[in-house]
Amino acid sequence: MVDHSVPSRQRSSGTPLAASPSVRIPVVAFGLSLGLFLALTFVLCVIFDLIFPQQAMYQTWLRLLPGFTWLSWPSFVLGLFESYAYGWYVALVFAPLFNFFARRWR
């Protein structure tokens, strides 16, 4: 039995906490976060490819991002947009599935 009279900041390590009644991933926050994460990752990879051309990953980007070519401003913007869109795709598919199964099997 959990003693609820003790404030949570005074609980010792290992003390069980009351479980949240519903675990839920907010789709919009997840989509914005994941889209921005993938867009920033794309930018960092392009910078890496420019600094270390012998270790370049652009061949991978050519396969993953439709219409992307190495390297022009329109292609860079397209790759940035597509990376952001991939983040939203994952969020729109994963978050509702997670929320459904978390609600079903608490």
Image: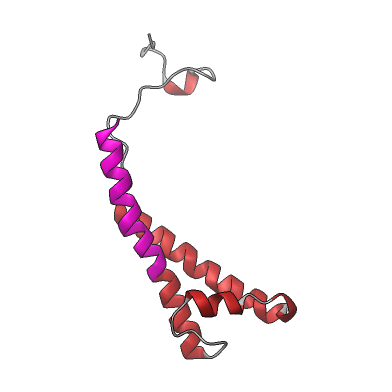
Q: Quadrant of the N terminus?
A: top left
Does 86 lie within the magenta span?
A: yes
Observer-nearest residue: 36 or 12? 36
The image position of residue 31, as x and y in percent, is 36, 59
Please name the residue shown 37% across and 55% down the image: 30
Please name the residue shown 35% across and 57% down the image: 91
User: How many numbered discs?
Assistant: 0
The image position of residue 61, as x and y in percent, is 54, 76
The image position of residue 60, as x and y in percent, is 57, 74
Magenta residues span: 85-106
Q: Is residue 71 left or right of residue 106?
A: right
Q: Is residue 60 above or below residue 106?
A: below
Please name the residue shown 28% across and 34% down the image: 22
Does 96 lie within the magenta span?
A: yes
The image position of residue 81, as x and y in percent, is 41, 76
Q: Is residue 61 left or right of residue 106?
A: right
Q: Residue furthest front?
A: 63
Q: Quadrant of the C terminus?
A: top left
Observer-nearest residue: 11 or 73? 73
Please name the residue shown 42% across and 75% down the image: 82
The coloring applied to the image is secondary structure
Magenta stretch, overall SS? helix
Q: Is residue 32 above or below residue 96?
A: below
